[in-house]
Amino acid sequence: MNKVTDENRQGEAIMTAPVEGTSKKLYLESYGCQMNFADSEIVASILREEGFSTTQNFEEADLIFVNTCAVRDNAEQRVRNRLNEYNRVKRKNPALLIGVLGCMAERLKGKLLEEEKLVDMVVGPDAYRDLPNLIKVAEGGHKAINVILSKEETYADITPVRLDTNGISAFISITRGCDNMCSFCVVPFTRGRERSREPQTIINEAKDLFARGYREVTLIGQNVDSYLWAGGGLKKDTYTSDELKEVTRFDQLLEMVAMTLPQMRVRFSTSHPKDMTDEVLKVMARHKNICKYIHLPVQSGNSRILEKMNRGYTREWYLDRIAAIRKYMPDCGISADIISGFCSETEDEHKDTLSLMEAVGYDFAYMFSYSVRPKTYAERNYPDDVPAEVKNRRLQEIIALQGRLSHESNLKDVGKVFEVLVEGTSKRSDAHFSGRTSQNKVMVFPKGNFKPGDYVQVKVSSCTAATLIGQAVEQEAFA
């Protein structure tokens, strides 16, 4: 499975969740990581209380919001193209309001509002509660903006409107923001400082999802491994004895969710190599319903480049974490983020990345060439000195290698039986269902008498580099 993309879920997503008895129409479009998609569900919940239902057709909308990603330059360009398209509709319907949400908001607020006049509202990721007020300001003919970052906002009390149409899998945000100042990354500047959400609200949200028929949750954050709840949810260097009694680490949270809902699959993303502990791995190994899959971004296989990226670990440390995963869960699926052509990267350092990929044997990877992001340490301090053609050639070598590794990984699964959670009909055949194994691999198999939400034992008969193909076998109860 080769994915040249941002984060774990990328691109355009037109999401719907119709609400009866409302007259105003909201069109939501999201780009980027899982956090953006989860944020869109929070926005839909807030605006539902204001009388908005969602629509798939932006031409009938009263309000259009684009939830933006600032991690990659190409995502920004796509957002601009879409805003131009929406403004063509606005010229026919001047009452239409257009807004930008999320990570592009703070950095491009002036250009989008005043210079290019593409939007009526700019709303940062910590300002969604202010949306009703901002909409009123925009309806009055004024430009509306709130991009203030918060050290406390987690939206823990808001029940998201689930916009994922399969009704089987859902995201639960457990942290917001990021304290890891990777030199190439803009996220700390667009999402603010890291803060964790109170554990019970996370468990309550998972229980509510299970009661409504969902059978898989993914606990998400920029760095889930650094989750730490200590009363106020903010990380500190030291705690009093009383505070320590109230501290919840990520491994504890993960086990709490798994034990509370033993028939619910539990995933998480994204892990950070410097923070991933053996305690988390032990919890994963103990509970069948915690999926045996870890997304562990490496970015580079060379220690000098990793230091320049301010990643906080070396090649050796990363490989030690891989060895720990294999020790506790030999069958664990592993994926990564990989960047080609970071500042000053040499040909030998690029080859270190290729050799690390070979050593790990990733099941799949998210791969891209380096692009400068404004406000980052790299933009201020490092020349972007690897030529574009060299970056692209190295990226193609990474993609080609991962294609081989993905295919080899899938070939090893032929003849094995996996438990698959049915997510829906296969995109290529109405006669087949599609679902994922615990290792996060896509499996396609004949529908039979199964339905979405079922756990099905499937024996792999063949594969491609991206997909396992199989047949259902005698079923065992999920427990």
Image (cartoon, rainbow, N blue to C red):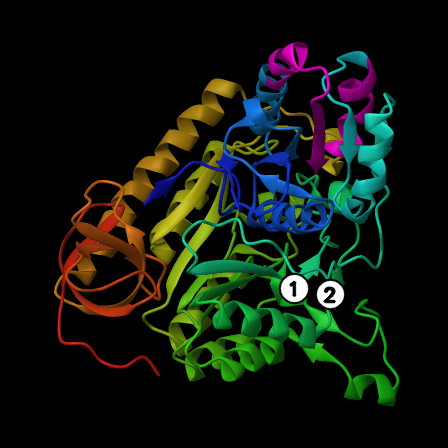
Give residue 76's quadrant in the image.
Answer: top right
In reply to whether residue 466 is colored magenta, the answer given is no
Asked whether the beta carbons under mark 2 and mark 1 sit within 8 Å of each other, the answer is yes
140 to the left or right of 57: right
Report the label total.
Answer: 2
* Residue at 56% across, 45% down: 33
| Measured Cα–Cα span from mark 2 to mark 1 | 6 Å
In reply to whether residue 91 is colored magenta, the answer given is yes
Graded by Cα atoms within 10 Å as few (under 14), some (14 to 19) or many (20 or more), the crowding at tag 2 reads many
Return the residue at label 1: 174
Graded by Cα atoms within 10 Å as few (under 14), some (14 to 19) or many (20 or more), the crowding at tag 1 reads many
- Please provide percent x and percent y for residue 381: 76, 32
267 to the left or right of 108: left
Q: Secondary structure at mark 2?
A: strand
Q: Amino acid at mark 2?
A: Ser
Q: In this rendering, is residue 136 above or below 21?
A: above
Q: Amino acid at mark 1?
A: Ile
- Please provide percent x and percent y for residue 24: 66, 35
Instruction: Report whether residue 141 is seen.
Output: yes
Q: Which mark is residue 279?
A: none
Return the residue at label 2: 196
Instruction: Report whether residue 295 is seen.
Output: no
Q: Which residues are magenta?
A: 86-114
Q: In this rendering, is residue 258 above or below 470?
A: below
